[in-house]
Amino acid sequence: MAKQDYYATLGLARGASIEDIKKAYRKLAMQHHPDRNPGDKSAEHKFKEVTEAYDVLKDEQKRAAYDRFGHAAFENGAGGRSNGFDFGFGGGFADIFDEMFGEFMGGRRGGPAQSARGADLRYNLEITLEEAFAGKQAKIRVPTMAPCEECEGSGSAKGASRRSCSTCNGMGRVRATQGFFTIERSCPTCQGAGEVIDKPCRSCEGAGRVRKERALSVTIPPGVEDGTRIRLAGEGEAGLRAAPAGDLYIFLSIAPHGVFQRDGAHIYCKVPIPMTTAALGGVVEVPTVEGSRARLTIPPGTQTSAQFRLKGKGMTVLRSTSRGDMYVQAQIETPVNLTRKQQELLREFEKAGQGSSHSPESEGFFARVKELWQELKD
């Protein structure tokens, strides 16, 4: 059976540009690829035809020979192919694959891939609530891979030369064909650089980086919350042989406080109030998160769990000049270790108050209990 014209196989006219040829092949190869048509022999046959046509027409010399002699130019296994078709993906689909995924795989064909960027690092830093309120300049020490000072990150000893890697022929990448797919990875000999070092640096053994502990300064802005992440660009691990460094991420956690609890921009605290102050009213001093004192007026008859608001005494709001509020919850304190005189005075107070409504909460409670008992008896 006579072979179909290669141009017709791709749906093109003679004289089509190389871009048109690539575009037509990309569309047909994706349409008829065996992985998209499992078990479809006709699709597999069509895929072979379009790949064979593209393998010839993409090459200027092969295309010129085909335009002059037709299929006869490639008969008798010319070019090392079997029946005019090379299924090893030396061209064809491999070129399309390289166009679409080459940069993702470490660089396009025709040159070595860039050396791998250094790894990103994470550092956990715990700060106090006061430091989260005011911000701080923290000093940290991070164990990392830093550029080698002796070779300045190049990996080569002073005066040493470089040569093209024989494993990848200077491409920086090697390929392996598995079935219908070609897998590309960085060259294991040169790590993608395309070159090898004749005389490696003694300090870093050719890696261009050494392990060391670095001292860094971190600016923590006022108002940060638990879990805030701070990124220090380029402060992560150094890349191989002067490749770009990764980033350092500082993850903040805020230590529990002995007095305050935080909820967003607001601060909460429980303050013990003497029984006499709660009954008669008065003024108490309470601590604030910035380390000062605030005066709080307690009205007469204040009960436990009564809450008072101190406006603008809460946390700093991140990237803002405003502040949250502080909420004080009263905890009425019952006196202990009373003297005999104090006990007598309290008993007199109790007798004098009989029949009066001095304890509204307890009276209300026992009234509800009495009603409940009455319902149970009925």
Image: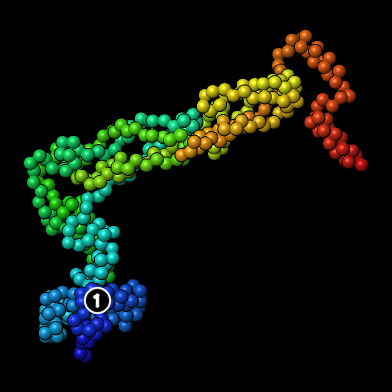
Residue 89, above or below 217: below
Residue carrying label 1: 20
Residue 180, above or below 315: below
Image point (19%, 41%), residue name:
153
Q: In this rendered view, identify the residue nearer to me: 56 or 262.
A: 262
> Is residue 52 toward the left or the right of residue 323 in the image?
left
Is residue 206 among the parts visible in the rendering?
Answer: no
Q: Residue furthest bottom?
A: 1
Image point (32%, 77%), residue name:
32
Judging from the image, the colouring scheme is: rainbow
Q: Which image quadrant is residue 73 in?
A: bottom left
Q: In this rendered view, identify the residue nearer to me: 135 or 9.
A: 135
Q: Which image quadrant is residue 177 in?
A: bottom left
Identity, as a three-letter code, of the amino acid under mark 1: Asp
> Is residue 258 toward the left or the right of residue 341 in the image?
left
Is residue 326 among the parts visible in the rendering?
Answer: yes
Q: Position of residue 292 (x, y in %)?
A: 54, 23
Q: In this rendered view, identify the residue nearer to me: 74 or 176.
A: 74
Q: Position of residue 8 (x, y in %)?
A: 24, 85
> Is residue 62 toward the left or the right of residue 229 in the image?
left
